[in-house]
């Protein structure tokens, strides 16, 4: 449901405008014809048209027209009848224009609200809301698009329960914002499908590569830029049984016994979309998580974010200083800290997932959603 427009919520603006009109009209009526400033109050109904509901704009416009008519007809004795008519007619035109302006604004706001609702629904369908959960694992985190007003951009993430275990994806499309969405959606849709049917992570990555290759072929035909995607794939089949495949993605952070370790398991694979440049097939590697391990996965929009002094965001240090926080609180704290560090000026889409095995009392099965261990 579209959010209620704040302009219609309060009485302060119309009350102040009406008081201003009455005060100015009273001054005009008591100071004689040499001081005639009521005409300048035509700004009042126009302000109401930009800030108030239609009924309140109508009220302000009526007060303005009545006040100016009173001043022009009864308090300016030296004016010729034609001048009085012009003054009253001018006030009437200002009032009508304010009402038309208000009606047009409200119609545009309603259209914008409907369009925003549709766009928001589409974007939510593309990327699931955090936190995610899949089986016994859960992922808290944040996603910030570099493009103002957009919920999604060039980063992707997903986690699904499959016949082959829990599978997680985090990826970063070359570029940022709206131009990268098409490639990201193509890869994400391919992952959701392939993860259910492919026996190995290598098979999943191959299907994603094929989908992106087709997308790039269409882009070349249309004269738009081709894209590549870095991605990190994780598969968990049981306690201590996990595999990881990196397609050119940045390292992740493993937290074990309160110590943060930067891990680059499987590093060296080419990004999706560039696999044809190498004759070497992608290979996943086995990892052995311990029961109380948890991890932080992110895109380079986080690690390459710069502060005012040009330094990169020290994510490992920030995690190490907050390892005692619960995942949800850690994610909120890191997002706030990142925005403070950059002064709110992120140059790239930024995604971070805090992934852990859920506590035993919370580990009830849930629909497809979540992350790695």
Image (cartoon, helix red, strand yellow):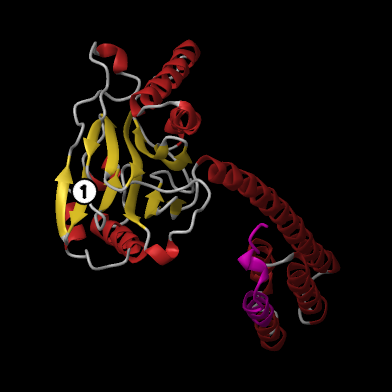
Asked if 309 appears above or below 74 in the picture, the reply is above
Q: Name the residue carrying label 1.
A: 253
Q: Is residue 158 left or right of residue 287?
A: right
Q: Residue at x 69, y 48 (%)?
A: 111
**Image location (x, y in percent) of residue 347:** 31, 43
Query: In the depicted view, which residue is nearer to us: 141 or 309?
Result: 141
- Examine the image and state in which quarter residue 250 appears: top left
**Image location (x, y in percent) of residue 89:** 81, 62
Query: In the depicted view, which residue is nearer to us: 277 or 152?
Result: 277
The local secondary structure at tag 1 comes to: strand
In what quadrant of the picture does the N terminus appear?
A: bottom right
Q: Which stretch is magenta?
A: 1-20
Q: Residue at x 45, y 20 (%)?
A: 211
**Image location (x, y in percent) of residue 27:** 66, 85
Asked if residue 294 can be seen in this view, the reply is yes
Dominant SS type (magenta): helix
Q: Residue at x 22, y 43 (%)?
A: 288
Asked if 302 appears above or below 264 in the picture, the reply is below
Q: Is residue 3 magenta?
A: yes
Asked if residue 307 can be seen in this view, the reply is no
> Can you name the residue that lies furthest to the bottom here?
30
Q: Is residue 24 left or right of residue 92?
A: left
Q: Is residue 355 magenta?
A: no
At label 1, counting other C-alpha atoms closer than 10 Å, the crowd grade (few under 14, some 14-19, many 20 or more) is: many
Query: In the depicted view, which residue is nearer to us: 42 or 254?
Result: 254
């Amino acid at each position: 449901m579209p959010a209620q427009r704040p302009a219609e919520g309060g009485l302060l603006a119309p009350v102040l405008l009406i008081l201003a009109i009455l005060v100015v009209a009273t001054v005009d009526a008591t100071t004689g014809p040499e001081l005639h400033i009521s005409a300048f109050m035509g700004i009042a109904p126009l302000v109401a048209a930009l800030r108030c509901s239609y009924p309140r704009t109508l009220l302000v416009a009526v007060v303005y027209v009545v006040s100016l008519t009173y001043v022009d007809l009864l308090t300016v004795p030296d004016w010729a009848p034609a001048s009085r008519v012009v003054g009253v007619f001018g006030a009437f035109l200002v009032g009508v224009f304010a009402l038309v302006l208000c009606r047009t604004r409200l119609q545009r706001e309603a259209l914008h609200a409907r369009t925003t609702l549709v766009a928001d629904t589409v974007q939510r369908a593309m990327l699931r809301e955090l936190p995610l959960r899949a089986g016994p694992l859960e992922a808290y985190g944040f996603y910030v698009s570099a493009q103002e007003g957009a919920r999604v951009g060039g980063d992707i993430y997903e986690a699904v329960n499959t016949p082959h275990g829990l599978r997680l994806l985090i990826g970063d499309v070359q570029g940022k914002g709206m131009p990268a969405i098409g490639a990201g959606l193509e890869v994400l849709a391919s992952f959701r499908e392939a993860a259910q049917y492919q026996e190995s992570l290598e098979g999943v990555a191959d299907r994603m590569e094929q989908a992106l290759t087709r997308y790039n072929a269409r882009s070349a035909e249309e004269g738009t830029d081709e894209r590549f995607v870095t991605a990190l794939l994780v598969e968990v089949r049981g306690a201590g049984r996990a595999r990881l495949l990196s397609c050119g993605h940045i390292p992740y952070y493993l937290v074990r016994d309160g110590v943060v370790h930067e891990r680059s398991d499987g590093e060296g694979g080419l990004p999706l979309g560039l696999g044809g440049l190498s004759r070497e097939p992608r290979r996943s590697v086995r990892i052995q998580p311990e029961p109380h391990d948890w991890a932080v996965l992110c895109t380079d929009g986080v690690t390459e974010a710069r502060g005012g002094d040009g330094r990169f965001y020290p994510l490992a240090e920030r995690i190490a200083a907050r390892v005692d926080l619960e995942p949800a609180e850690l994610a909120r704290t890191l997002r706030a800290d990142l925005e403070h560090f950059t002064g709110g000026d992120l140059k790239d889409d930024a995604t971070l997932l805090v992934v852990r095995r859920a506590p035993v009392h919370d580990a009830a099965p849930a629909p497809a959603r979540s992350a790695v261990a």
